[in-house]
Amino acid sequence: MNYLFYPGCSMEASALEYKTSMLAVFQTLGAEVQELDDWTCCGASVAPVMSDLLGLALPARNLALAEKAGDGRQMVVGCSACYVRFQCTNAAAADRVVLERINLALEVENLSYGGTVQVRHMLDVLANDFGPGVIAAHVKRPLTGLKVAPYYGCQTVRPYSAFDDGQSPFSMVGILEALGATVYHHLREAHCCGTALLTTKSDVGLRIAGEILEAASPADCIAVVCPMCHMNLDSYQDKVSQVLGKPVKIPVLFLPQLIGLAFGLPDRALQLKRHVISADPVLARLAA
Amino acid sequence: MTTPDVINLTATKRDPTFVNRLTPAGHQLYTCIQCGTCTASCPSAAAMDITPRQMWRMVQLGLEDEVLHSKTMWLCSTCYQCQARCPRGIPLTETIAKLKQIALQERIEEWRESTAFYLAFSDVMHRYGRMREVEFMARYFLSTNPLGALGYAGMGLTLLRRGKLRPELPRLRGEGRLDRLFDRVAELEGRQ
């Protein structure tokens, strides 16, 4: 299997460990992954607020690069905020008039988009191109006894639900079970992490993140598939504890880090030390 | 703004074209049946001055001032739950982005802090082509509430120690990475 890969800004910076662990897992599974050359920001939820066309042209710039470089390869994305922007742009570009307008903008970059690039979330590829069977075959150190609370977040599964249920997602279940972990289900698996509200309206945002952390707290750790979800759930636990009036402390791991642990991948790929909430209790549990 | 329980529609300025300006899909709001699924699904509804259901009704009625002066849109975290569940299939979340866009263009003073977030992000993206989280946050706090940044200082230091933040020197002169594309889009939209 052969993919193009769009890291997006967060996976190059705050969520670098998501990128390194994802690439290491893909390599172990035998996938060939090539990073898209010269990529730029997808515009996130900001560009559509600046202008209708900018909100489409920024993702389309990258889609056009992928179309040119791809030989029909699909483009894998790990950040759910990037993923949703690419999905929205492809949906809008199905209208030829809109696509022509996007291409008028892309002219200045000497690019043109034909609307053909299929964009896949990393979780989609893991769950459906490889699947639990293939993943289980690579497990060297099963995560036996580890209770993992899956957290999908919002934009991974909405509004398009391209590969999972937008209300009750399940893609992580088979993967976590293949690793030997126990899945801890809770009521906040597809709720919003609060996104930018933790910065702009922190009283509201911290409460939203707090509800997720509280719901998942009986588990040993939370598994996430988006840099923004990770930032909000991992870095703000002190502030969340203040807002909730009780201490909250639970490690939050990117799904590929958990897979990597079970595959026995080296620490330089997993980079667990980069998290604010230490992953040591998870490692201790596995050593026991 | 506080919204009265009853709005006197005769005495209130209304713009019947408001719905149609919420491109590309605002016109679908005409089919809203006021079921309230959007409000029930919204993680921030409790903190809003008018609920999403009320806001969409006010949009239908052309109550532009009331909608643009409500803080409701700024509490949207773009989680797409209302849009995914809307029984009429109206792209509500995407239409909120359009409301924010109009509020930004009208430079409404009371939303200066909210719009500063978008402007700071856009400036950094424009300049470097990719997000620089440290500069983005610095620009945001400097333009709104420099002292507010202190509340995040402890967390910032922890993130620095973990290698999660990568401070880079700002490059304020010379051509921005996405100048050409931003300029072209502005030209096509008749903003230049």
Image (cartoon, coloured by chain):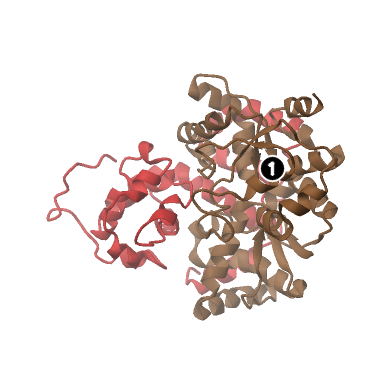
Give the x, y percent position of residue B94: 45, 59
Amino acid beneath label 1? Glu
- What residue do we see at 48% from left, 32% from top? A207
Check the image and name the residue furthest to the top.
A246
Residue picked out by circle 1: A177
- What residue do we see at 76% from left, 43% from top? A259
Which quarter of the rendered picture does the N terminus of chain A lie within? bottom right
Give the x, y percent position of residue A8: 69, 54
Taking depth in this image into account, of B83 and A7 the one nearest to the observer is B83
> In the visual, does A285 lie left or right of B190?
right
Instruction: Indicate the quadrant where residue B185 lies.
Output: bottom right
Taking depth in this image into account, of B129 and B90 the one nearest to the observer is B90
Mark 1 lies on a secondary structure that is helix
Give the x, y percent position of residue A61: 65, 68
Which chain is painted in brown? A
> In the visual, does A71 lie left or right of B46?
right
Taking depth in this image into account, of B103 and B98 the one nearest to the observer is B98
- What residue do we see at 52% from left, 55% from top? A158
Per the rendering, the colour in which chain B appears is red
Q: Is residue A81 above or below residue A273?
A: below
- What residue do we see at 73% from left, 45% from top? A178
Q: Is residue A199 above or below residue A102?
A: above
* Chain letter, disc 1 residue: A
> In the visual, does B168 lie left or right of B104?
right
Q: Is residue B167 visible?
A: no
Which quarter of the rendered picture does the C terminus of chain A lie within? top right
User: Dot 1: few (<14), some (14–19), or many (≥20) neighbours within 10 Å?
Assistant: some
